[in-house]
C-alpha cells in the first residue's frame, strides 16, 4: 500500500486531505520521532498531533528526518484548552509552529468546545484571522456538537472544514455526521479502533474479519473509509502501523456494512464534549 492508494477527501476551502492518517495521542515526545518516521516511511502522509499531546517537537523532528518535502505531508495540530481566547490562541499557534519547526500547518483545530468556559467563539475568530493572514491553510474544530458549530458559523459566517470527533463501530455518530455534512463539514473520526478499550475483541467484528481474511483493525478502518470519513488510527507498533494502512485496500459489501452498522451502542471511550 502506498500513499497513492489513499484517497484524498475534498474540503470546503478547496483543499484536500488524505482519508487515512496517523494519530499520535499518548505517544511520548521521545518516541514520537521514531513512530512518525516509520509511519511516513511506509506511506502515511497525514499526521495528527496536538499541543496537548506534548509531542509536537518529536513530530517535527520526524518530518525533517523523513526527507519528504513540506508539501508532501499533511500536518494537523490543535489548540489546547487552557489557551482558548483570541490573543492566547494567536500566541499558542506561534508556539506550536516553533515546536513543530514549521511555518504553517495544514489544519489547525480547536481541540474541545468547553461550553462552560464560553470561549470557543473568540477562539474560532482567532483561527479565522490566522487563515485570513495566510498563516494556516485550513481551520476546523474537534468535539463540536450542533449548537457549538452553529454558534461559530453564525458569528463569523465561516464554517470549519473538519469536525474531528470520536467515532467507531460502538459510537457511529450518524446524527453528528449528518449535521456536519449539512454544513459542508467533513467528519474526521478519532479513536477509530476504540482506543485500545476492547472494541477489537468484539466477537462479530473478529468473526467478520476472519471470514474476509483481513485483521479486525483493517476491517474497522475499512468501515470508516467506506462511510467517507477521514480517519487517524494510532499505533506505536511498527507492524500495526503498516497493517492499518492496508485498510485502504479492503472493500466491504453492503451486507458487511450492515453487520457493522448493527453494532452501534452509543459507547463513548473518551470525554463528553457537552461537559467541560
Ligand atoms: N480530538 C480529540 O479529542 C482526540 C481524542 C482522542 C484521539 N484523537 C486522535 O485520534 C487518534 C487515534 O485515537 P486513539 O489513539 O484514541 O485510538 P485508536 O487509534 O482507536 O486506537 C489505538 C489503540 O489501538 C491499538 N492498535 C492500533 N492498531 C492496532 C492493530 N492493528 N491491532 C490491534 N491493536 C491496534 C494501539 O496499540 P499500540 O499503540 O500499542 O500498537 C492503541 O492501544 C489519536 O492518536 C489522536 O491523534 C483525538
Image: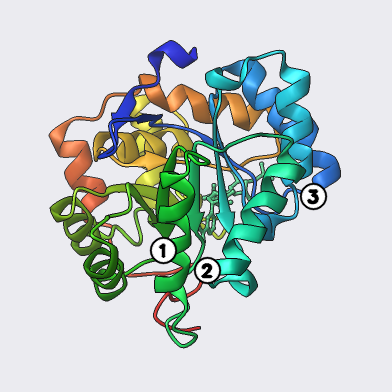
Work out whether residue 199 can be spotted: no
Specify the quadrant of the image occupied by residue 4.
Answer: top left
- Could one spot residue 223 in this view of the protein? yes
Q: Distance from label 2 to label 3 (Cα)?
A: 29 Å
Mark 3 surroundings: few (<14), some (14-19) or many (≥20) residues within 10 A: some
Q: Residues within 10 Å of mark 2 (few under 14, many from 20)?
A: some
Crowd class of label 1 (few under 14; some 14 to 19; many from 20; radius 10 Å): some
Instruction: Please name whichever residue, 270 or 14, is drawn nearer the observer in this view of the structure.
Output: 14
Question: Looking at the image, is mark 2 or mark 3 nearer the viewer?
Answer: 2
Helix, strand or loop at disc 3?
Answer: loop
Q: Is residue 28 left or right of residue 8?
A: right
Q: Where 122 falls versus 30 (above or below)? A: below
Question: Residue at position x 39%, y 24% from top?
Answer: 248
Q: Secondary structure at mark 1?
A: helix
* Residue 5 position in % (x across, y down): 39, 14
Task: Tell me: residue 72, above or below residue 12.
Answer: above
At a point 27% along the width and 55% down the height, the residue shown is: 159
Which numbered disc, 1 or 2, marks the residue that appears first in the sequence?
Answer: 2
Residue, far front:
133
Q: Nearer the viewer, residue 97 or 32?
A: 97
Q: Is residue 172 left or right of residue 50?
A: left
Mark 3 lies on residue: 28
3D distance between C-alphas at marks 1 and 2: 7 Å
Give how far across and how far down residue 47 sits, in percent. 57, 36
Cβ–Cβ below 8 Å for labels 1 and 3? no
Left or right: 261, with 206 as reference point? left
Q: Residue at x 26, y 34 (%)?
A: 226
Marks 1 and 2 close (CB-CB < 8 Å): yes
Residue designated by label 2: 86
Task: Pick whichever of labels 2 and 3 is earlier in the sequence.
Answer: 3
Residue denoted by label 1: 125
Report the front residue among 139 and 224: 139
Amino acid at each position: 500500500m502506498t500513499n497513492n492508494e489513499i484517497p484524498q477527501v475534498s474540503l470546503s476551502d478547496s483543499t484536500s486531505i488524505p482519508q487515512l492518517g496517523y494519530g499520535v495521542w499518548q505517544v511520548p515526545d521521545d518516541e514520537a520521532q521514531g513512530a512518525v518516521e516509520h509511519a511516513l516511511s511506509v506511506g502515511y502522509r497525514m499526521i495528527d498531533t496536538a499541543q496537548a499531546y506534548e509531542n509536537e517537537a518529536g513530530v517535527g523532528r520526524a518530518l525533517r528526518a523523513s526527507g519528504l518535502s513540506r508539501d508532501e505531508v499533511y500536518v494537523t495540530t490543535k489548540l489546547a484548552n487552557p489557551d482558548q481566547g483570541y490573543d492566547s490562541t494567536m500566541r499558542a499557534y506561534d508556539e506550536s509552529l516553533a515546536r513543530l519547526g514549521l511555518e504553517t500547518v495544514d489544519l489547525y483545530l480547536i481541540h474541545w468546545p468547553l461550553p462552560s468556559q464560553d470561549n470557543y467563539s473568540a477562539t474560532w475568530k482567532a483561527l479565522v484571522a490566522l487563515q485570513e493572514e495566510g498563516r494556516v491553510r485550513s481551520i476546523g474544530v474537534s468535539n463540536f456538537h450542533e449548537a457549538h458549530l452553529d454558534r461559530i458559523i453564525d458569528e463569523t459566517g465561516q464554517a470549519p472544514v473538519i469536525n474531528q470527533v470520536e467515532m467507531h463501530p460502538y459510537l457511529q455518530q450518524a446524527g453528528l455526521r449528518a449535521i456536519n455534512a449539512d454544513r459542508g463539514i467533513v467528519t474526521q473520526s478519532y479513536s477509530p479502533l476504540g482506543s485500545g478499550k476492547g472494541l477489537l475483541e468484539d466477537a462479530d467484528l473478529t468473526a467478520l474479519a476472519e471470514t474476509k481474511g483481513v485483521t479486525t483493525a483493517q476491517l474497522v478502518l475499512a468501515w470508516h473509509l467506506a462511510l467517507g470519513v477521514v480517519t487517524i488510527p494510532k499505533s506505536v507498533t511498527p507492524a500495526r502501523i503498516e497493517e492499518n494502512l492496508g485498510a485502504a485496500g479492503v472493500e466491504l459489501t453492503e451486507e458487511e456494512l450492515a453487520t457493522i452498522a448493527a453494532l452501534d451502542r452509543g459507547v463513548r471511550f473518551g470525554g463528553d464534549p457537552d461537559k467541560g
